[in-house]
Image (spheres, rainbow, N blue to C red):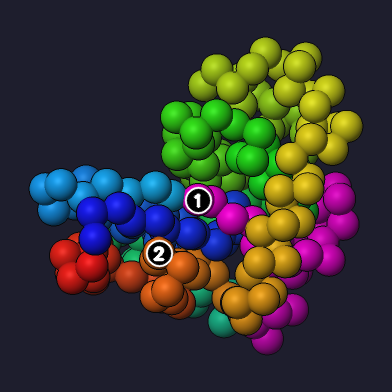
Amino acid sequence: MNELLIDVYMDTSCPWCRMGTTSLLTALKQLPAGKKATVRWNAFQINPGIHTEGEDYRQVMIGRLGGVPQFEARKKQYNENGKHFGLKYNMDIVKYTPNTTLSHQLISMTPEHLKVQLIEKIYTAYFEEGVNIGDVDELVKIGSSIGVSDAADLKERLTQGEGLEKVELGQRSAQKLGVRGVPFFVINEEISLSGLQSPADFVKLFEQM
């Protein structure tokens, strides 16, 4: 099969999703001759109940993981794993666990040719710069900086709920598939891959299809 349809279920505040996205994009650069891929980015929220303004990152993670030592170990784990993908995680400067609804809206609103660039910018802003990616003004800065639209237009569209329907559709789709964690990949609506995959794993699968 020369046409690949890849559905990616991800969240913009998920460290593993950032690695998974980078891994997939690396693999897509190594597609066998004659094969083409279309990627659909689907919203999944790992913290759907987070307040709109965000919540304290440290407190949320300590509560989830069971203590400070576990939290410190997890931060190291992000960096150790991220190095394999050329990624940095400056989690000591991350203050917020964001509500990611607006960031997913922005992704859904963005023209296809800019989506990957936008997703990477959002990830960098959160994981390396500590930006609250649940804040509409911060997202407007990111979106306008790559030419999605001008700042005033983006803010109006986001606050009026543009893209929310697509975000909710992605979440319903994930629910139907039984997705419990991300990243999660579906190839040609047939083969499901849960969790972080290496570029080599993706390439091997693509060659077999």
> In the drawing, what numbered circle is on residue 158?
none
Marks 2 and 1: which is nearer the front? 2
Element carrying mark 2: loop
Direction from residue 43 to residue 49 in the image, left or right: right
Q: Which residues are magenta?
A: 40-69
Query: Looking at the image, which residue sits at the far bottom?
Result: 66
Q: Is residue 47 magenta?
A: yes
Where residue 67 sits: x, y (%)? Answer: 66, 83
> In the drawing, what numbered circle is on residue 40?
1
Crowd class of label 2 (few under 14; some 14 to 19; many from 20; radius 10 Å): some
Direction from residue 163 to residue 28 in the image, left or right: left
Q: Is residue 144 above or below residue 44?
A: above
Q: Is residue 162 visible?
A: yes
In the picture of the structure, the residue carrying the numbered disc 2 is 188
Residue at position x 66%, y 34% in the image: 109
Direction from residue 204 to residue 189 in the image, left or right: right
